[in-house]
Structure formats: C-alpha cells, structure tokens
Image: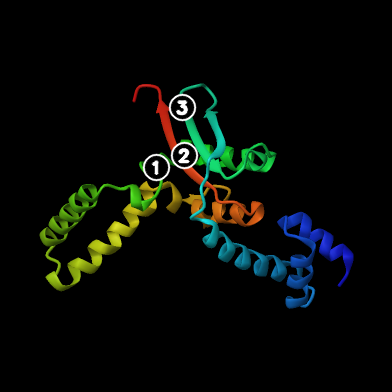
C-alpha cells in the first residue's frame, strides 16, 4: 500500500499505521472509504470503553461575545495525558459552544426525570385527544413526540453544530476511538444575563 496514502489517512483519523494499512486494503485504496471503515471500527471499540472509570479531565468555559452568555463544562477522561492534549481541549470547547447555542436541559436521556416524561406524555395525549385522533394511534404519536423531546433537550442527542450529520454522542465516540479512552460529559451550567 502507498505510504503517502497511509500517512494521509493517519493524519486525518489519528489511527495507527497498521489500522490505516488494513483499512486501505479493505477499501481498495479509497481513502474516504477507509475513513468510514476506521470510524465504524472505532465506534465499536468506543462502546467497549464506555464503562471504564473517568477520573481525569478538565473544566472549561465559553463566554459569548458581549459577555451576556456563558457556559461552564466538566468533561472527563481516563488519564491526565489525554486531558492535557489540544484535541481534548478542542472537543471540550466544541461541546461548550454547543451548550451555549442549543441550551439543552440534560446531558442524556437517562438524566431526564421520569416525572418529566410522564408529564410530557400527558400533555401530548391531551392535545391529540382534543384534535380528535383515534386512541389506537395516539400512543405511537406520543412515543414519536417523546423522541423529539429527547432530541431537543438532551445534549448527547443534539446534532453537532459543526457537522449536522452526527450527534454529540457520535462526536464523543469518535474521540473515544481516537484516544482509546472513555470520555464523558460530567456536568454543565449555562448562564444568561437576565435569566
């Protein structure tokens, strides 16, 4: 396999030489296809790492122009070596910017209190009954609306501002694959003057 292709793939993905070589072989030399193969493998590896302890990390802040809006974010990883890298700090900054722009209420769907979901279901059901929808389809519509609720209120479900083809959860999985470490958003706070 051409060493230039391997080098380019390595620079674009951060994957090891042997992984790049194998991916290029599997993709018949097509770099874009090789990137796809590495991403798929990386995401599979990332899922395996998701249960590992994250005792290192950083707290970062984002203050929007005009100092009327700000975000504090704690994002954790497994080692201080990774926490100190520019790439990890860049990920943290991207997520802080996402929080500033999107104003999510929760980190993930698991963080939404059950009573909030029950209240949402109650409201949606009442609306649909008033619209005269048949009982047998109301449940399906309500479940769909709850999925939309998660997509709008949970950070991990949001479409990444810089690449709307992936979610924040997908973005973090890419970095887990790149670093070989578990990464989690521990907590965040968004502040807006007057709110």
Decide which of 59, 182 is in the foreground and name it.
182
Picture coordinates of residue 102, whole percent (x, y):
44, 41
Quadrant containing the N terminus is: bottom right
Picture coordinates of residue 188, whole percent (x, y):
44, 35
Quadrant containing the C terminus is: top left
Disc ID at residue 99: 2
Residues packed near mark 1 inside 10 Å, few (<14), some (14 to 19) or many (20 plus): many
Q: Which sits earlier in the primary sequence, circle 2 or circle 1?
A: 2
- Residue annotated with mark 1: 104
Picture coordinates of residue 171, whole percent (x, y):
56, 53
Disc ID at residue 69: 3
Q: Are marks 2 and 1 in contact (CB under 8 Å)?
A: yes
Disc ID at residue 46: none
Q: Do the residues labelled 1 and 3 touch (CB within 8 Å)?
A: no
Decide which of 45, 1 is in the foreground and name it.
45
SS state under label 1: loop
């Amino acid at each position: 396999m051409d060493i230039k292709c391997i080098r380019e793939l390595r620079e674009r993905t951060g994957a090891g030489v042997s992984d790049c070589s194998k991916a290029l072989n599997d993709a018949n030399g097509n770099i874009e296809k090789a990137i796809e193969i590495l991403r798929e493998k990386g995401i599979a590896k990332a899922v395996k790492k998701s249960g590992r302890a994250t005792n290192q990390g950083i707290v970062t802040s984002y203050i929007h122009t005009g100092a009327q809006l700000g975000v504090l974010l704690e994002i954790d990883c497994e080692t201080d070596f990774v926490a100190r890298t520019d790439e990890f700090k860049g990920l943290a900054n991207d997520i802080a910017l996402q929080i500033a722009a999107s104003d999510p209420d929760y980190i993930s769907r698991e963080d939404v209190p059950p009573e909030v979901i029950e209240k949402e279901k109650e409201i949606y059901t009442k609306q649909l009954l008033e619209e005269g929808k048949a009982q047998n389809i109301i449940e399906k519509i309500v479940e769909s609306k709850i999925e939309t609720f998660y997509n709008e209120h949970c950070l991990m479900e949001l479409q990444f501002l810089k690449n709307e083809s992936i979610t924040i959860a997908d973005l973090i999985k890419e970095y887990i694959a790149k670093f070989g470490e578990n990464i989690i958003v521990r907590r965040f706070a968004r502040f807006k003057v007057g709110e």
